[in-house]
Amino acid sequence: MKTLKKITLVFMLFIGTFAIVACEEEETSTTVSGDDCADKIEALVDIMLSKSDALSVNPTPANCEALKTAAINVLKAAKNCANGVEYEQAAQAWRDIDCSDFN
């Protein structure tokens, strides 16, 4: 249960970081942007939420790993779409979650 709380905290921190970035003024950059980018992130977030639901219903190491992978995929997409996303810190927080706690 302690790990589930940690995962929830990391998820909330990620959402907060992404919300702040989304609210910043747009700057000229070489990153991908536009509706395609937002659609891709939205699709990846939907996948991540389904993995989170699966972990809540069946807390296993495999479901935990699936959630971690989905979260990192969202972070990678956000990194390519927006300036200022702290990809490495957020991704490392997800990598540091010990899914063996779900055995």
Image (cartoon, rainbow, N blue to C red):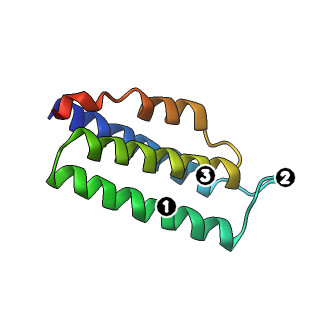
Q: Amino acid at mark 3?
A: Ala
Looking at marks 2 and 3 on the same chain, the residue that comes earlier in the sequence is marked by: 2
Give the secondary structure at mark 3: helix
- Give the label, 1 or 2, closer to the camera: 1
Q: Amino acid at mark 1?
A: Leu
Q: Which mark is residue 30?
A: 2
In space, the residues marked 3 and 1 are separated at their CA atoms by: 10 Å
- Residue occupying image coordinates x 54% and y 30%: 89
In space, the residues marked 1 and 2 are separated at their CA atoms by: 22 Å
Q: Amino acid at mark 2?
A: Thr
Give the secondary structure at mark 1: helix
- Give the label, 3 or 1, closer to the camera: 1
Give the secondary structure at mark 2: loop
Q: Is residue 43 left or right of residue 8?
A: right
Provide the residue designation for mark 1.
44
Q: Which mark is residue 53?
A: none
Q: Which mark is residue 78?
A: 3
Q: Nearer the viewer, residue 63 or 46?
A: 63
Mark 3 Cα shell of 10 Å, populated few (<14), some (14-19), many (≥20)? many
